[in-house]
């Protein structure tokens, strides 16, 4: 089952246009700082970061950084599946 996104990415880009790279990064940091350390909270944080990843598409460099993180995490998951 895919995650349902109840927003349009084009709308979220307006946040980046308004607040810039720093504002986007600060919003991510705030989400991380609000994390309560629980398993449930970890998955909620995952959702918040997913949205901010979509926001990052307002800026080519920020999007590259998000894609780098996606690639690294996908590799880690594949390695864990393979046992190592």
Image: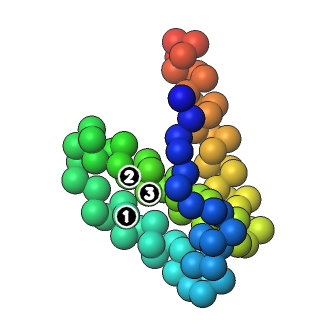
| Earlier residue among tags 1 and 2 | 1
- Residue under pointer 1: 31
Residue situated furthest right in the rendering: 60
Query: Where residue 2 appears, x then y in whole percent?
Result: 56, 35
- Mark 2 and mark 3 residues within 8 Å of each other at the beta carbon: yes
Quadrant placement of the N terminus? top right
Residue 66: which quarter of the image?
Answer: bottom right
Q: Residue at x 41, y 68 (%)?
A: 29
Badge 1 crowding class, 10 Å Cα cut-off, few under 14, some 14 to 19, many 20 or more, is: some
* Numbered disc in front, either 1 or 3: 3
- Out of 19 and 82, give the one closest to the viewer: 19
- Residue under pointer 2: 45
Residue situated furthest top in the rendering: 83
How far apart marks 1 and 2 lie (CA) works out to: 7 Å
Q: Is residue 25 left or right of residue 40?
A: right
Q: Secondary structure at mark 1?
A: helix
- Mark 1 and mark 2 residues within 8 Å of each other at the beta carbon: yes
Query: Where residue 47 appears, x then y in whole percent?
Result: 44, 50
Q: Is residue 52 left or right of residue 46?
A: right
Badge 3 crowding class, 10 Å Cα cut-off, few under 14, some 14 to 19, many 20 or more, is: some
Q: Secondary structure at mark 2?
A: helix
Q: Is residue 83 above or below residue 21?
A: above
Q: Residue at x 28, y 56 (%)?
A: 35
Residue 30: which quarter of the image?
Answer: bottom left
Q: Secondary structure at mark 3?
A: helix
Q: Residue at x 22, y 43 (%)?
A: 38
Residue 84 - label:
none
Query: Where residue 81 appears, x then y in whole percent?
Result: 54, 16
- Mark 1 and mark 3 residues within 8 Å of each other at the beta carbon: yes
Instruction: Residue 46: tell me if it is visible.
Output: yes
């Amino acid at each position: 089952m895919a995650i349902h996104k109840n927003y349009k990415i084009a709308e979220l880009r307006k946040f980046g246009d308004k607040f810039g790279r720093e504002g986007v990064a600060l919003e991510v940091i705030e989400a991380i700082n609000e994390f309560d350390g629980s398993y449930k909270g970890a998955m909620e944080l995952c959702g918040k970061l997913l949205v901010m990843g979509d926001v990052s598409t307002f800026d080519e460099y920020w999007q590259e950084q998000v894609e780098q993180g996606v690639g690294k995490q996908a590799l880690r998951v594949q390695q864990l599946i393979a046992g190592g």
